[in-house]
Amino acid sequence: NALFEAPDNNPYGAKFYGTAAVSAALGGGDWQAPACGKCWKVTGTSNIPGYDQSTQTTLVLRGANYCPPSNQACADGKVHFDIAAPGFDFTQNSLCPKCPALESDEAAALARCEYWMI
């Protein structure tokens, strides 16, 4: 699982290509669920206070994992992509936030990456 810079002039206008865990509302589920291997073009704006809210970024994401309903971000029919970018774990909703414990010298940097603007 990774997030890669997309080639220049790609047909989707994407800045990044990557993989994501998807919620059941998007077809995520156990082995060979409908979303497995499906791709989405996702365009969003920054939601970080103090940054230009009009800046848009487009990603192409392939469903490669399941974001289960036990994760509050994916519960109750929510449409959710959990983008697979190692080191950028949003620990408030993570089912397995191990990075701060395993890399205690980097805990402060990891906390800042939770709000990383793609």
Image (cartoon, grey):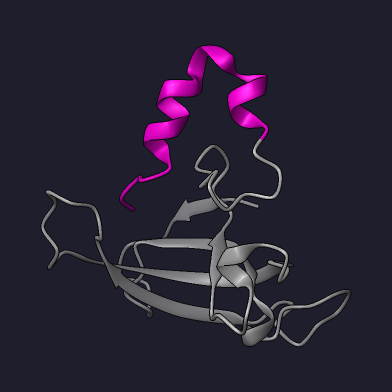
Relative image position of residue 67 (x, y in whole percent):
68, 66
Tell whether position 25 is magenta: no
Q: Quadrant of residue 109?
A: top left
Q: Nearer the viewer, residue 18 or 10?
A: 18
Relative to 113, is 84 above or below? below
Q: Is residue 77 left or right of residue 8?
A: right
Pick out the residue farthest to the right: 31
Residue at 32 percent across and 62 percent down: it is 8
Q: Is residue 50 left or right of residue 96?
A: left
Relative image position of residue 104 (x, y in whole percent):
57, 15
What span is in magenta? 98-118
Relative to 88, is 46 above or below? below
Relative image position of residue 15 (x, y in whole percent):
34, 62
Mark count: 0
Magenta span: predominant SS is helix
Q: Quadrant of residue 91?
A: top right
Residue at 64 percent across and 75 percent down: it is 23
Q: Quadrant of residue 71?
A: bottom right
Q: Nearer the viewer, residue 87 or 62?
A: 87
Relative image position of residue 42 (x, y in whole percent):
41, 76
Residue at 24 percent across and 53 percent down: it is 48
